[in-house]
């Protein structure tokens, strides 16, 4: 089924993309002149390869859950995940054995507590061992900025009194050649693939991001390939003044996936599903409960729209049972 079909779709899309006009930027990254408009299944099959370094960014909202689910459905393995603030979608990816490492600055279920699949992967190596590389939040942002600027490393004042440099060989120090001040440096981030969610794109692949932007712009500019899911594709973006727009020439693929950030929110479209985030704590705490949920709602659904219907049905039943108990 899907594995062979997805592999062929990916090969076809990679070939089409390679044949489109492009240029190489100062960081050595090839950018095409126009994004492909395609399905999410085809985009993940084409550009997320086993062993890739993948950054799925989004801060409080616009978290690319739909894309993460598709990575799980396609059984991608040995991914080197990067994210400033990994939360539920990375817990799911780690728990399903998709990741071999995680580079990050903070991880948790916002407002709820721990990521239990992330924790167990570190503590007991289940389902597979997970290597971690921890940086400060500011350093992760600086590393993306360095990657976007075509620079080899980030420079910042930081890690004073911190023990992170003792545990992370990629945090080093140098003396400023002008002042003699000791500064912290870390390698630039240039992921193989950045995956983002946004509100709108136009037919040329220009993407409009509204609300809290986070590090998406820098992640897109730093990465070799960029996949963006959007709530809708429109003829005109009608972007307000000073809006954040990712131009089509830095975007590889655009995929229309309505609700694609749920259970996080998309500014101007829908709110955060706080009930789901609370429920995830119990779902993810136990291995068997986690696997049963993932098999039913992710592996057992064809796409994100079907996942949403499956989850909504479960939530309705839960609400009816709660009303009956009252």
Image (cartoon, rainbow, N blue to C red):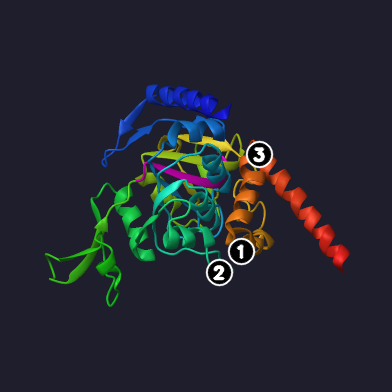
In-front residue for pair 17/208 = 17
**Residue at horizontal 79%, vertical 54%?**
316
Q: Which secondary structure, mark 1?
A: helix
Q: CA separation, marks 3 and 2?
A: 28 Å
Give residue 306's quadrant in the image. top right
> Which of the two discs, 3 and 1, labels the residue nearer the N terminus?
1
On the image, the x and y values in percent for residue 304 come to 64, 41
Q: Which secondary structure, mark 3?
A: loop
Give residue 317's quadrant in the image. bottom right
Which residue corresponds to mark 3?
301
Q: CA separation, marks 3 and 1?
A: 22 Å
In-front residue for pair 286/278 = 286
On the image, the x and y values in percent for residue 71 come to 51, 41
On the image, the x and y values in percent for residue 116 come to 53, 62
Q: Magenta span covers which residues?
A: 191-201
Q: Is residue 239 above or below residue 159?
A: above
> Which of the two discs, 2 and 1, labels the residue nearer the N terminus?
2
**Residue at horizontal 61%, vertical 63%?**
281
Q: Is residue 85 left or right of residue 292?
A: left
> Which of the two discs, 3 and 2, labels the residue nearer the N terminus?
2
Q: Residues within 10 Å of mark 1 (few under 14, many from 20)?
A: some
Q: Residue furthest bottom?
A: 161
Circle on res. 113: 2
In-front residue for pair 200/174 = 174
Q: CA separation, marks 2 and 1?
A: 8 Å
On the image, the x and y values in percent for residue 34 come to 44, 30
Q: Is residue 197 magenta?
A: yes
Circle on res. 281: 1
């Amino acid at each position: 089924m899907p594995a062979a079909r997805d592999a062929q779709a990916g090969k076809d899309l990679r070939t089409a993309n390679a044949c489109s006009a492009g240029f190489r930027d100062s960081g050595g990254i090839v950018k095409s002149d126009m994004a492909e408009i395609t399905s999410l299944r085809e985009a993940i099959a084409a550009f997320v390869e086993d062993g890739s370094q993948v950054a799925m960014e989004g801060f409080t909202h616009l978290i690319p859950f739909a894309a993460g689910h598709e990575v799980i459905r396609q059984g991608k393995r040995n991914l080197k995940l990067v994210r400033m603030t990994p939360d539920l979608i990375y817990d799911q990816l780690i728990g399903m054995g998709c990741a071999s490492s995680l580079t990050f600055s903070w991880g948790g279920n916002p407002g709820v507590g721990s990521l239990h699949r992330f924790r167990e992967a570190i503590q007991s190596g289940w389902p597979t061992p997970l290597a971690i590389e921890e940086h400060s939040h500011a350093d992760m942002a600086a590393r993306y900025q360095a990657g976007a600027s075509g620079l080899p490393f980030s420079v910042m004042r930081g890690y004073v009194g911190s023990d992170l440099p003792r545990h992370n060989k990629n945090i080093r120090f140098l003396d400023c050649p002008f002042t003699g001040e000791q500064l912290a440096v870390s390698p630039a981030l240039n992921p193989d693939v950045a995956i983002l969610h946004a509100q709108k794109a136009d037919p040329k692949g220009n993407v409009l991001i509204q609300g809290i932007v986070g590090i998406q712009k820098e992640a897109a500019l730093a990465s070799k390939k960029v996949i963006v899911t959007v709530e809708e594709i429109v003829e005109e973006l009608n972007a307000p003044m000073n809006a954040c727009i990712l131009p089509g020439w830095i975007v590889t693929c655009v995929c229309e996936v309505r609700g694609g950030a749920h259970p996080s929110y998309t500014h101007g479209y829908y709110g955060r599903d706080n009930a789901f985030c609370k429920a995830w704590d119990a779902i993810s705490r136990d291995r068997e409960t986690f696997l049963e949920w993932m098999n039913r709602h992710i592996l057992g659904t064809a796409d994100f729209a079907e996942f949403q219907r499956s989850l909504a049905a479960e939530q309705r039943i839960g609400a009816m049972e709660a009303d009956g108990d009252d």
